[in-house]
Amino acid sequence: MTLSYEAAIGSLHTTDPAWPRPAVLDVLEAPENRHLLDFVQEDPFGAHVFPGNVPGSPSEFLADLDEQLASSGPIHLWSYIPTCAYRCRFCQYPVVLVKGNPEVAYEKAKSWVDLNIAEAQLWLDAVPNLRGAEVGEFNVFGGTPSLLPEPEIRRLLEFYRENFGFTPATTIRFEGDPSTFTPAKLELLRDLGCTKLSSGVQSFDDHVLQLCGREHTASMCVDFVRNARALGFEWVSIDLMYGLLDQTLDSVRRDLDVVLENEVTAVVCTKLHLASYSDTRTGVTGEKPAAWQLPSYRDKLVGDGHRWPTLGEQYQMRELLTEGLRAAGYTEHPTMYFARDGRGPEKWKAIMVDQDKQEPEVAIGLGGSSSCRASEAITDVNSRRYTETVLAGRIPLGSATRFTPEAQEARAVKMALTTLQPLRESLHRERFPGRSLFAEPWLGKFRSLASRGLVRLGPDVVELTPAGEVLVEAIITTEL
């Protein structure tokens, strides 16, 4: 779906006249920023996997992780349950469809809990310091883990609570589809100590949802938010997407209205991403492209009378959401993660990316992405190979890479920039003795960004400008 430069400029200039023209469009159309425009045609927000720059092995990654865990702060731990009832048309992630009669579906779901627990035990055996590492936040993500039968949810959560370093300060978060967060499951999750819920709503427009292949309605999404709040969950987060097929500025405005009317705790706003994660290394990808990534399918949709929003309209949608949420008291930290009433930042992201933290992430399950300061690894995304490896008693890491000292520093700077907080020279020097944000290789890069109005340089800080905040993902991917 990548456009030529001329076509991209034309798409950038095509906006909805009923809504303001975002100032960032002037930055993107400048010839010196052509590389940024090339990136943002299909870029994600906040989905980065930071790959190492030298070859590594699973055993080296596990040793690096164990060494850091011996003295690290609270970590982010997550359990990836890949079960889904269907595959969305934009989904690139490794998922396993759970269908059929109730008995068959139950056994298939149960088997993925068995595998997740078995893999977790392998991690505990191979990384001695993991068992005692304090867990800051534990997330059960997917897939659609809310598809799991209630006994399997209980078994999974009880295993992790009993075998990992949970403390009274640990928060537990569970993800699911609005239609599968039944009142009974919500009550069970509350009783098991979950205080946070996350749901991929994507839109409150039934037409847009149907085109995405989602099998829930807007009213189900609202019911989920209201039921969760009524049951006392302290954090109810939803994902919204923009740039979707047939989506309009008016539709996005209605999405924002529903969020504000229902006082949703947190909102993650994501641009539709059609470039392959496996090519861009900005996320964990599955084994086959999303339906919407197929050019023939996209062309057919347009031939049938549907329409993709232009680049200009996408930035209008982004501005509508960000400005509307900020005006309502939401704060953005990290990029495109909004929390209301000072409730942020998003705890699990802060653990990983804040300049003064950047602690390990341990992801257990098909396609999980794990990292520490010295290296990173991704779990196998092939479900058959993953299963065989776990049953053979080995951690199913599909790839592992390490960071040179220079790459560790670069990764730290990039992650810190995604928080949208100023980079502090004092914190950088503390972590990287003898290095400075105001010496090469950083000074030239930051001066170039400053000359184009994307950062501001102060005595002790490097700070993104409003345009830099909008384009932070493009900046860290193409310039740093």
Image (cartoon, helix red, strand yellow):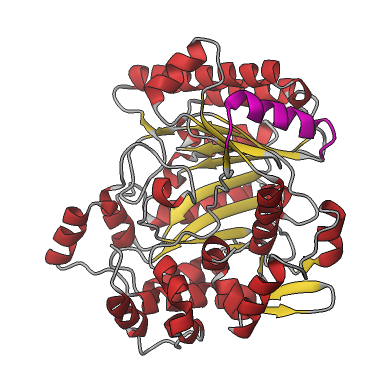
**Tag count in the figure?**
0
At 64% across and 30% down in the image, what residue appears?
61
Question: Is 309 on the left-hand or right-hand side of 332?
Answer: left
> Vertically, is 275 above or below 341?
above
Q: Nearer the viewer, residue 305 or 124?
A: 124
> Vertically, is 55 above or below 58?
below
Residue 169 locus on image (x, y percent): 81, 40
> Vertically, is 315 above or below 224?
below
Q: The C terminus appears in which quarter of the rendering?
A: bottom right
Question: Is 138 on the left-hand or right-hand side of 267?
Answer: right
Query: What segment is highlighted magenta in the picture?
Result: 55-72
Q: Is residue 268 visible?
A: yes
Is residue 220 inside the magenta stretch?
Answer: no
Residue 29 locus on image (x, y percent): 42, 83
Quadrant housing residue 251: bottom left
Is residue 66 inside the magenta stretch?
Answer: yes
Q: Nearer the viewer, residue 305 or 218?
A: 305
At 59% across and 26% down in the image, what residue appears?
58
Quadrant housing residue 162: top right
At 72% across and 47% down in the image, what residue appears?
405
Q: The N terminus appears in which quarter of the rendering?
A: bottom left
